Amino acid sequence: LRHPDDFVHNHINDLGFEAVRHPGTGEVGFNVVVGGYFSVKRNATSIPLNCYVTQDQVVPFCKALLEVFRDHGARENRQKTRLMWLVEEWGVEKFRDSVAAQGALALSDAARAEHKPWARRVLFGVGQQKQQGLSWVGACVPAGRLLPQDLAQAARAAREFGDGELRLTCEQNVVFTSVPTDKAEAMQASPFFHKFSTTPGQLTGGLVSCTGSQFCGLALIETKQRAMAVCEKLEAQLDIPKQVRMHWTGCPNSCGQAQVGDIGLMGAPAKKDGKAVEGVKIMLGGKIGQNPELAKDFEKGIPADEESLLPKLKEILIREFGATEKAPNTTGGRLVVAAAGAPPAVAPLAHGRPAGAPAAAPAPAGPECSPPPATYCKAVSLGEAKATAPLWKTLLLGCLAGAFISFGALLALTVGGACPGLAAADPGLQKIVLGAFGLPFGLLMVLLSGAELFTGNTMLVTMARYEGRVTTGQLAKNWATSYLGNFAGALAVVALVGQSGLLAGAAGPLKVASAKASLGFGAALARGVICNWLVCMAVWQATSASSLPGKALGVWFPISSFVAMGADHSVANMFIVPMGMALGAPVSWGQFLANNLIPVTLGNVLGGAVCCATVFALNFGALGNKASA
């Protein structure tokens, strides 16, 4: 429709109808534009056909135009099989007359339409409709990734709070219509909005992405997951004063419409360190709405890995869009949206604001921690990334995680485990010291380095499996590979510490190893459940936190607690018991495996996959939808 917002992107479609009131009759009809398209060979914006059609003429006009194109459009060259080529070959007047003759239509010249300067709006939050007492509610669907269970939740919300109707936008978001204004707030508390925000970040709110190489054979790069991760990291680093529309497309066919984004990224060849890698071409300056423009090429051949791409995008956002570095320990603003009220009930964010309008208020600071539904989504994405990584990377990062946890256990044995006087005088305080110094630092290193820890993966990858993002086979491979890597990393540290003599003569490691290897199967299993329930909560809390202090605090309490309680962590035990054995503890490998490692591992699986992943999936994910269906 002809409106300065141009929510339907008329200017890049083969055929567009722009609503306008005819100056002579006062009737609402349509001016016609034709010829917009993207392709490998050429990109073009639509041009006016200089004709006006009434509402009754729209369908006959479309039929006649398609028949003319069917009979006369080029077919020899696939790249020229688009409407614009025929319009340019014939000229606008001949093409319009041919359509009119084909459909026996009496067409008048285009009606004149004028609009005052207008800032294109965004459809997030709550806005008042023309109908008294009714509002629309707009939610952001990052990169357009809407799963079946998400759509089911959206349908329930539309039926319960609105008229049963919802609309999917060209920007890959969702708008619920005809919601009684007094129900709009309650609607936003429904399950769909736990995952999809009405106040997204300035980049996430403008994010559009094609399917990418995950499901499309033409795409040169993976787009959706990469786009969401990039936006999240940039929003964590920068304060961005207005919405920036970032469009990702995997190939020059441009299903993601990179040419209309403020920033467009298109899959392209690139090299890094002399080797071919996934890459992008960056375009800048695309506009939608009044005075639309296609983006211009900015830079080609940029590797798509975050190490290369993030600094480039950060530089662009600062230089071109007024972004600034965040102050320490802040998470930045969120999109400013209007509440229900007089139109326009949306925040003017792109390309300025209407003449005379007041400047937008400063964006409020975001939360230090994500709410549980958003944390669940982050955790699912982490689990998907882990389960789909190459096995050699999982193994290598698993070795790293095993080493880091072993360093934490070594510190615990060196400090809290070397206080026999304190243990005799005040055993409770000694346990607190044992828990406080060691394993929290080990897990924090794991999380900040992206290492692969088996115990955390029992929660993260299981949740990704529940959401259909990974297969059971991928889950099993991730668990097995990370477990083997953890064991190898732990034994490497055992050898390193043994050679160093750091624990030579220490009695604590021998005592701890003997005690752990003498547990009964049931006791070891239960301790494993308790331990990994708390470990996975530490991972959950660190995922929720947006700052390093927040992540550290989220890790410290659960990890220090399970150590002080005496619960058992399979990966920590991969270091502690073999270390004690190497120092002379009377424990055999058979005793260690049967009495400790096997039952503790099973308990860790139950604690992570059942107590955490399953419960969270029931509350925030697919399992809850199935249970309530």
Image (cartoon, rainbow, N blue to C red):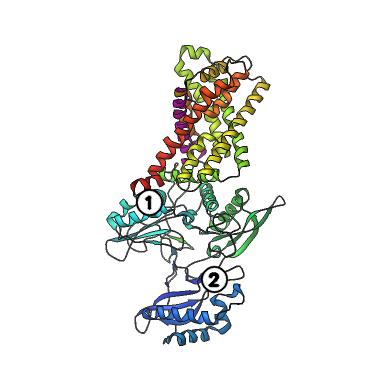
Q: Is residue 393 visible?
A: yes
Q: Please provide percent x and percent y for residue 5.
A: 44, 67
Does the magenta portion include 48? no
When the figure is inspected, residue 391 is found, relative to residue 220, above or below; the finding is above
Disc 1 marks a residue whose amino acid type is Phe
Q: Residue at x 61, y 15 (%)?
A: 584
When the figure is inspected, residue 520 is found, relative to residue 142, above or below; the finding is above
Q: Which residue is mark 2?
A: 37
Q: Which residue is mark 1?
A: 192
Does the magenta portion include 524? yes
Magenta stretch, overall SS: helix
Instruction: Decide which of 489, 199 is in the foreground and name it.
Output: 489
Residue 277 placement, left or right of 55: right
When the figure is inspected, residue 486 is found, relative to residue 161, above or below; the finding is above
Q: Is residue 198 visible?
A: no
Q: Please provide percent x and percent y for residue 153.
A: 37, 52
Q: Please provide percent x and percent y for residue 92.
A: 52, 83
Q: Residue at x 50, y 53 (%)?
A: 240
Res 179 → quadrant: bottom left
Disc 2 marks a residue whose amino acid type is Tyr
The range drawn in magenta is 523-549
Whether tag 1 and tag 2 are in contact, CB under 8 A, the answer is: no
Q: Please provide percent x and percent y for residue 232.
A: 51, 49
**Which element type, helix, strand or loop, lies under badge 2?**
strand
